[in-house]
Amino acid sequence: MATFDTIDDIPTDSRVLVRLDLNSPIEDGEPQTNRRFERHAETVRELAEAGHRVVLLAHQGRPGRDDFTSLAGHAAILSERVGRDVAFVEDTYGEAALSAVDALDAGEVLLLENARMCDDELPEESPEAKAETEFVRTLAPRFDAYVNDAYSAAHRKHASLVGFPLVLPAYAGRVMETEYEANTAIATREFDGPVTMVVGGTKATDVIGVMDALDDRVDRFLLGGVAGELFLRAAGHPVGHDVGGTDLFDEQWEANRELIESVLDERGDALRLATDLAYEGADGERAEVAVNDIDEKEAGYLDVGSETVAAYEPAVRESDAVFVKGALGVFEDERFADGTVGVLEAIAGADCFSVVGGGDTSRAIEMYGMNESDFSHVSIAGGAYIRALTGEPLPAVEVLEAAAGRQ
């Protein structure tokens, strides 16, 4: 487990620099509210109520992309969630930003402009190199403490994540604490009964690598999504979808074929593959077909079938722990939500430790009216969740641990 200090350890009346992850979907140029605001608001509110002067760093998108925008709209959403004004300055470490930081009174909150608008932020470099950047060297002297609450970006070596902890006393925020503890449980905890992992989503490379790395930490894998189709293909079933003569999954298949075949050979007894799949029928309604009846790639499969869901549900209920990475189908379309929703509802009703990870899957919980409180933890992380599952080091966590050793 991590051995970092937390916001409980910050000296009173401190000026605190806090890194959040408010990266959000952008529609018509405006950020859309999501669970990240609600989760980070807890840390911000607690620091402000303790009388600290709170300055926030966050990012939105990447340079060159449509979602690379200012954080002005994020400040408005965060203000609503925190329950107090969150001021915004259209600057990150120039004179306007420094003046706004200096003018803060106890309990006030300020959000600086998008950290990724700074040239020093994005290149992946060592913490030592990031600590020497103009960004860090200019901003750090204004503060008494640094807090990282951006667990979902903890796998990045960006200046705002790994540079400041080398030059300031550094602490973990509430999101960092809870996410790290829950997401590393599969690698650090001993469970009395079976451990099950639900594997789905569209990014097969990520989850297949996790399956291989976890090895005997997981007793059974319930597969769906793109990864599930690729394993069915490896098992000899001609699933997939050709569009204009092009196999939509061919790139992921070629990139992962050797590893898939290895996992299938070595852990075949632990794999639960779909026995039926759902697709859009000629009448536009949901239709299902048994996997054994598929003899050519003639349909795009959008969910696991009802027989598969019926088999997966008891496997979940018999588990001592369940970890979810990815949706089993295209749940955004209600016709193809049965797999994802059915298994999530089974997990919610089971007496087990449960962690649901990945933005899409957690969005399904909200979209279909399930209660987050029915799960042990619903993660807001993606890449960091993947790495935590396998015990892979997270650079932003490592520098927090190192800082705790110096404090």
Image: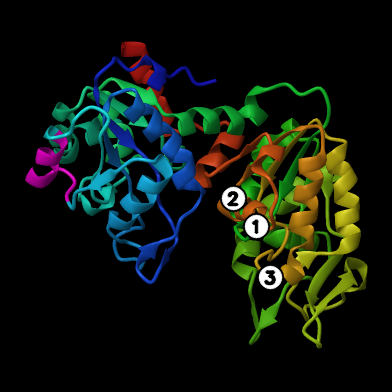
* Residue type (three-letter) at the residue carrying disc 3: Asp
First of labels 2, 1 by sequence position: 1
First of labels 3, 2 by sequence position: 2
Is 248 on the left or on the right of 238, as rendered? left
Residue that lies at the very extreme toward the left in this rendered image = 95
Disc 1 target residue: 201
Disc 3 target residue: 333
Residue at 69% x, 57% y is 368
- Residue 231 visible, this angle: no
- Residue 8 visible, this angle: yes
Q: CA distance from mark 3 to mark 2?
A: 24 Å
* Residue type (three-letter) at the residue carrying disc 2: Asp
Residue at 63% x, 23% y is 188
Crowding around mark 2 (Cα neighbors within 10 Å: few <14, some 14 to 19, many 20+) is some
Nearer the observer, disc 3 or disc 2? 3
Disc 2 target residue: 206
Highlighted magenta segment, given as a residue range: 91-101
Please, is residue 116 above or below residue 51 in the view?
Answer: below
